[in-house]
């Protein structure tokens, strides 16, 4: 039995390898930034979620040091036993104030926040209406709840309305629409004002996962609800501390008070998993504080995004349209994405190929991401490298 399982796993790994789908991890020897070192080589990094470049910001590092000195290394407890320090509540209140919500609750990751949210709030009489391109953590979170599931085609408002009608026809008690704010593989933005209008028409609540927006999109980095003008019509916002807000780790839910209060009593990843480490809490608090006032970094991010898009388009690459710092370069099949990533690696540009199962078959891509840690010379260097690699591989 044991032998046959191992043999089967070995065969699966061989299939993944034969299909050119094996993901390999390169080891970085420096802090996360716009320029990193790998195997003694300096590289321009185009694939971190480090949108504002705060991952190695000196003030964030200093704040983490202060957290370590004053509050220790770890909590050795979940929140409700003896794992809540004053700084945990300060971070929750700062997130809630930033997003204009009553309160917030923090988790070890946004994967946990999305895994935590549905099951305590909704039962089998209720309905969750979810965008088909939502992040894996939302899909898993929905699976963990007993609510009835409805799925609408990505950003398709006719289909969303059809699914809301289907939920109504089944006499579902409560309805919750769940969507990513920014779809991470495509870099597109959810049409939140239209989603909220349909939610109001059919008496649904709206939950937005803003992992790829909080801190860098919208006024003061308040995210897609602000950017699209939906504002407080969005009821629940989930997000991460592992991207723009310092990039360490941790997730959150910001919502009306009763929702947060119930999650503190019932959310399983909150009740049964360790409290966030003090260094992460104080570092993330500082990162949020810096992000709020960093209009200069947001402007630089926008400038680099437009410059890189224009450069790659002029070189002949096929990009997905969008206004976010996520710029997907479409290449077709998985081995081509791997080859382009390899060629760019050789030329000193760090990117990753994305292919099935992360994106659909035939839609393999290099997902590039801009960062305020990069500068104009880095972008020129990257456009040259893409052009050279694209010609070598006969992509352009
Ligand atoms: C990154 C991401 C997550 C997971 O966040 P972690 O804090 O890394 O667990 C969830 N949802 C979306 C849309 C993401 O992009």
Image: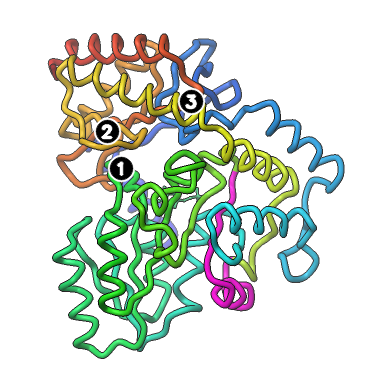
Image position, residue 1 (x, y; %): 41, 63
The answer to whether residue 360 is magenta is no
Q: What is the C-alpha distance between the residues marked 1 and 2?
A: 7 Å
Residue that numbered label 1 is attached to: 185
Q: Earlier in the sequence, mark 1 or mark 2?
A: 1
- Look at the picture and state if 202 lies above or below 102: below
Which label was assigned to residue 372? 3
Front-most of residues 274 and 154: 154
Image position, residue 336 (x, y; %): 20, 27
| Residue at position x 76%, y 62% in the image | 84
Magenta span of residues: 249-269
- Look at the picture and state if 47 lies above or below 316: below
Q: What is the C-alpha distance between the residues marked 3 and 1?
A: 20 Å
User: Could you tell me if the residues under marks 1 and 2 are in contact, i.e. CB atoms within 8 Å?
Assistant: yes
| Residue at position x 58%, y 36% in the image | 293
Residue that numbered label 2 is attached to: 328
Front-most of residues 22 and 45: 45
Q: Residues within 10 Å of mark 1 (few under 14, many from 20)?
A: many
Give the secondary structure at mark 2.
strand
- In the displayed structure image, the side of residue 99 where residue 3 appears, left or right: left
Give the secondary structure at mark 3.
loop
Front-most of residues 248 and 104: 104
- In the displayed structure image, the side of residue 264 where residue 76 appears, left or right: right
Which label was assigned to residue 22? none
Image position, residue 391 (x, y; %): 17, 11
| Residue at position x 34%, y 60% in the image | 179
């Amino acid at each position: 039995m044991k032998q046959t399982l191992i043999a089967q796993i070995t065969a699966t790994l061989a299939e993944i390898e034969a299909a050119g789908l094996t993901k390999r991890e390169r080891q970085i020897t420096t802090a996360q930034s716009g320029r990193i070192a790998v195997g003694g080589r300096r590289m321009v990094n185009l694939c971190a979620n480090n949108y504002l470049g705060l991952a190695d910001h000196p003030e964030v590092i200093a704040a983490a040091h202060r957290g370590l000195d004053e509050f220790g290394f770890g909590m050795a407890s979940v929140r409700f036993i003896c794992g809540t320090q004053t700084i945990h509540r300060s971070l929750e209140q700062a997130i809630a104030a930033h997003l204009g919500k009553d309160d917030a609750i923090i988790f070890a990751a946004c994967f946990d926040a999305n895994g935590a949210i549905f099951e305590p709030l909704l039962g089998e009489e209720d309905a969750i209406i979810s965008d088909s391109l939502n992040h894996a953590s939302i899909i898993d979170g929905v699976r963990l709840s007993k609510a009835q599931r409805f799925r609408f085609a990505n950003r398709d408002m006719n289909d969303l309305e059809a699914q809301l009608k289907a939920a109504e026809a089944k006499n579902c008690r409560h309805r919750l629409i769940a969507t990513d704010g920014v779809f991470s593989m495509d870099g597109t933005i959810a049409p939140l004002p239209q989603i909220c209008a349909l939610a109001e028409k059919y008496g649904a609540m709206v939950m937005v996962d803003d992992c790829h927006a909080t801190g860098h999109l919208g006024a003061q980095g308040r995210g897609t609800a602000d950017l699209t003008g939906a504002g407080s019509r969005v009821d629940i916002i989930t997000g991460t501390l592992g991207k723009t807000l310092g990039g360490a780790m941790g997730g959150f839910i910001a919502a009306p008070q009763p929702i947060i209060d119930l999650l503190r009593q019932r959310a399983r990843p909150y009740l049964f998993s360790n409290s966030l480490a003090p260094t992460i809490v104080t570092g993330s608090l500082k990162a949020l504080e810096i992000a709020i006032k960093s209009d200069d970094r947001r402007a630089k991010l926008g400038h680099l995004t437009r410059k890189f898009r224009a450069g790659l388009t002029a070189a002949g690459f096929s990009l997905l349209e969008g206004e976010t710092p996520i710029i997907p370069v479409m290449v077709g099949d998985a081995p081509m994405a791997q080859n382009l990533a390899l060629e760019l690696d050789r030329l000193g540009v760090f990117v990753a190929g994305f292919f099935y199962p992360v994106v659909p078959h035939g839609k393999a891509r290099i997902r590039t991401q801009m960062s305020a840690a990069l500068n104009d010379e880095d972008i020129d260097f990257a456009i040259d490298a893409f052009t050279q690699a694209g010609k070598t591989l006969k992509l352009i």
